[in-house]
Amino acid sequence: MAEYSSDDQTGKPLGRNVADAVVLTKELTARLDELLAGYDWRRDYSDRRSRGDAAAYAFVVRHAVNHLRDPRTPGNSPSPGSDGETAETLGASFCRLSSQLSRAWALYATSAELHDLRPTARFYEEVRVWMAKLDAADRESRGEPIPEDIQRLLGALIAESTETGDVLDIYEAAGMPKPSLMDLGPDFVKQAQAATNPHLAIEALRDLVAKESVKATGTNTLRQQAFSDRIAELMRKYTNQQLTSAEVIAELIELAKDVVAEAGRGERFEPPLDQDELAYFDAVTTNQSAVDVMGEGVLANIARELVAIMRRDIRTDWTVREDVRAKPRTSIRRLLVKHGYPPDQQPGAIKLVMDQMEAMAPRFAAEHG
């Protein structure tokens, strides 16, 4: 009951009796119809079926999802009200009401009065599953946990998904080929920008770039955060309609090229820095005074020595024994003092190095196992 609005609870709450529940189910369906008034999915589905389109149902599900999530759809970019609170977006309203409909339908779908609503309820459930999947991907790309209710929905409903089966392929839904980061040339840019559902194309590319950037940066916390911030800023501009869908697709592909180049960043040094050494190099060069006074060559050598300490001092029992955890910390501090790092004595510079050590240590401990 807590998931229903106060109006729902004081009006015709689910569970009072079957008749009231049927009325509530019809009301929820009508409210969902209103949310999708900008896309006449029933007519689109009917037209496509009449032309013999075997994928008509999947098409309208995908197009409905694109409509509900696209920032350009009226209602998806609400302004703050007089109380300072921002109204619920169209997509968020759909997720809330479709969740209520799902619960009501699970209890009262056998009622003869709801028989004619079965196709509509099934359609809205399919769209709800898709919305949940994309919400989960969005959260994952920002490093946020997925709420338990979304995890349950994905675990239960996607496995049983209603009519379409293959509708959960986001690249097919977007209307573009599934790319690898090595394939993002001019032809792919044109295909992505001409996608049937451009917003889903953006979500697919955002998800790809986010996941590949995590792989490319490994335990380099600074670079991971830098890519995450760039993706977030790009999506913020898109959501605020400062960039068109074509522009944000082009920007995401340029960002993807930077992810591809990430693996070769250490090659400009002599000898080249490996990924672990590069992570420490990024940490120590964050302090601008160190770059100015000590130079990149000295800082690269410090990075090599820091990794050598990790290989020497991190052991399998690093996670459980405080004396083992203390040893690399002490060794790192001594090394930094020996080199006079940082020249401006900023404690935050040393903390960055220690944070990088903490992020990297579990993998070194596992390698010693």
Image (cartoon, helix red, strand yellow):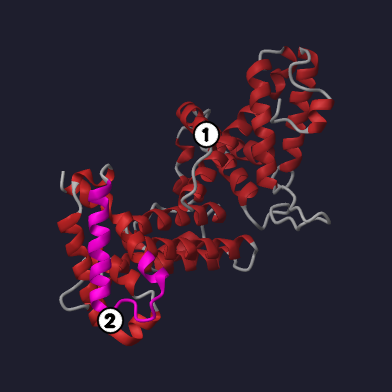
Confirm whether the magenta stretch covers residue 132: no
Q: Quadrant of the C terminus?
A: top left
Q: Quadrant of the N terminus?
A: top right
Asked if residue 140 is positioned above or below residue 186 in the image, the reply reads above
Q: Residue at x 39, y 61 (%)?
A: 224
Amino acid, disc 1:
Glu
Residue 180 drawn at (x, y percent): 34, 56
Q: How many marks?
A: 2
Is 337 on the left or on the right of 246, as rendered?
A: left
Earlier in the chain: of badge 2 and badge 1, it is: 1
Confirm whether the magenta stretch covers residue 327: yes
Question: Does any portion of residue 118 appear in the rendered image?
Answer: no
> Would you identify the image quadrant in which residue 343 lies?
bottom left
Amino acid, disc 2:
Glu
Residue picked out by circle 1? 148
Q: Nearer the viewer, residue 308 or 20?
A: 308
Task: Tell me the distance, in whole angstroms, between the alpha carbons under discs 2 and 1.
Answer: 46 Å
Q: Residue at x 45, y 49 (%)?
A: 171
Is 277 on the left or on the right of 344, as rendered?
A: left
Which of the labelled discs sits on residue 296, or is there none? 2
Q: Nearer the viewer, residue 343 or 130?
A: 343
Q: Residue at x 22, y 63 (%)?
A: 331
Looking at this rendering, what residue extends furthest in the bottom direction? Answer: 293
Residue 359 drawn at (x, y percent): 33, 55
Residue 103 drawn at (x, y percent): 65, 24
Q: Nearer the viewer, residue 333 or 170?
A: 333
Residue 11 drawn at (x, y percent): 84, 26
Q: Residue at x 38, y 77 (%)?
A: 345
The region drawn magenta spans: 322-351
Is 207 on the left or on the right of 106, as rendered?
A: left
> Would you identify the image quadrant in which residue 268 lies?
bottom left
